[in-house]
Image: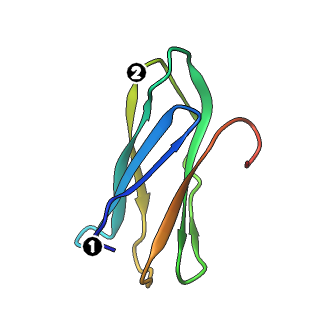
Amino acid sequence: MDETAMETRSGVDLTLSYNAGMQKFIGTIHNTTASTVTNVRVEIHLSSGKELGPTPRTSLEPDETKEVTLDASGQRFTWYNVHIELGSGSS
């Protein structure tokens, strides 16, 4: 719960941490490629079975970073995992 989650998918880096005081997951997505990446979303799966997100689809220009925030108010969980979704599907 106190660790920072990190994932990279097709040149998009996600870094996300849980802020217990705010009851929110806060982090960034960053495009490390030389091309625009479209339809980027972030999803979190809690140990309780609850899914947070996905975030609204966004595009990232080359080397662009955007903030990501997902509300976890009222959720009880002991662990979580995150993943990046790219494209128009949910893969």
Q: Is residue 46 above or below residue 63?
A: below
> Which image quadrant: the N terminus?
bottom left
Q: Is residue 5 above or below residue 33?
A: below
Q: How is the image coloured?
A: rainbow
x, y (%) of residue 16?
A: 37, 54
Q: Secondary structure at mark 1?
A: loop
Q: Distance from label 2 to label 1 (Cα)?
A: 30 Å
Q: Crowdedness of circle 1 by 10 Å Cα count: few (<14), some, many (20+)?
A: few
Q: Is residue 9 above or below residue 22?
A: above
Which residue does the numbered mark 2 point to in the structure image?
63
Asked where in the image residue 5 lies, by quadrant, the reply is bottom left
Q: Residue furthest right?
A: 89
x, y (%) of residue 45?
A: 56, 69
Q: Amino acid at mark 2?
A: Asp
**Of callouts 2 and 1, the N-terminal one:** 1
Q: Which of the numbered marks, if any, corresponds to residue 80? A: none
Q: Amino acid at mark 1?
A: Ala
Residue nearest the viewer, comparing 73 with 76: 76
The answer to whether marks 2 and 1 mark residues whose Cβ atoms lie closer than 8 Å is: no
x, y (%) of residue 62?
A: 46, 17
**Residue occupying the point 28% across, 71% down:** 2
Please give the count of numbered marks on the rendered protein.
2
Q: Secondary structure at mark 2?
A: loop
Q: Inspect this view and state whether residue 57 appears.
A: no
**Residue occupying the point 55% across, 84% down:** 48
Q: Is residue 54 above or below residue 71?
A: above
**Residue occupying the point 32% across, 60% down:** 4
Which residue does the numbered mark 1 point to in the structure image?
20
